[in-house]
Amino acid sequence: MDTRSALARWHEVAAAGSKPEEIAAIMREDAVFLSPVVHTHQKGRPIVVAYLTAAGKTLGNDSFRYVREVVGEGTVVLEFETEMDGILVNGIDMISFDDDGLITEFKVMVRPLKAINKVWEMMAAQLERQKAAAD
């Protein structure tokens, strides 16, 4: 699958609410997530799906929008903007795909520092809610 088609699938999943089962369907089993606030790589489909689901619920509010796309061979960089509790968040999603169009790596970078702190706070709370719901 070409990169643009894989990217189109990501946009469909994100627009539909970043449901865990839909994210899992476009994710390799050995995918890796690189967080702007967690220093270790998060490895494996279940943890990557958990992080992207939480991100969809915290960052993916009504103000979220991608403002720029750079598409390369097997990799895309998507710049986004959103507002969280009155704080403007600017960041990028760097997504790598395999030849089947599945996500192999998802890296998020966020700025400014105030936004990083807000993302950390809200993501931690959302991940705790997801963990409690799963138990």
Image (cartoon, grey):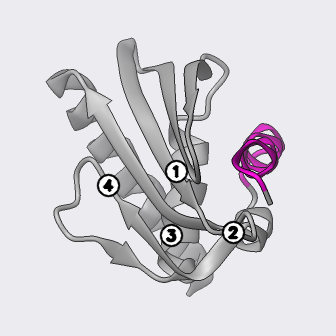
First in sequence: mark 2 vs mark 4: 4
Mark 4, residue position? 35
Mark 3, residue position? 48
Look at the magenta stretch and give its main secondary structure. helix
Quarter occupied by residue 35: bottom left
Question: What percent of the width, then of the height, locates residue 87?
Answer: 34, 15
Instruction: Name the kind of residue labelled 1 in the image.
Output: Ile
Instruction: Name the kind of residue labelled 3 in the image.
Output: Val
Mark 1, residue position? 95
Q: Nearer the viewer, residue 122 or 3?
A: 3
Mark 2, residue position? 99
Question: What percent of the width, then of the height, locates residue 100?
Answer: 75, 70
Marks 2/3: CA distance? 19 Å
Q: Which of 68 and 72 is in front in this view?
A: 72
What element does badge 2 sit on?
Answer: loop
Instruction: Name the kind of residue labelled 2 in the image.
Output: Asp
Quarter occupied by residue 112: top left
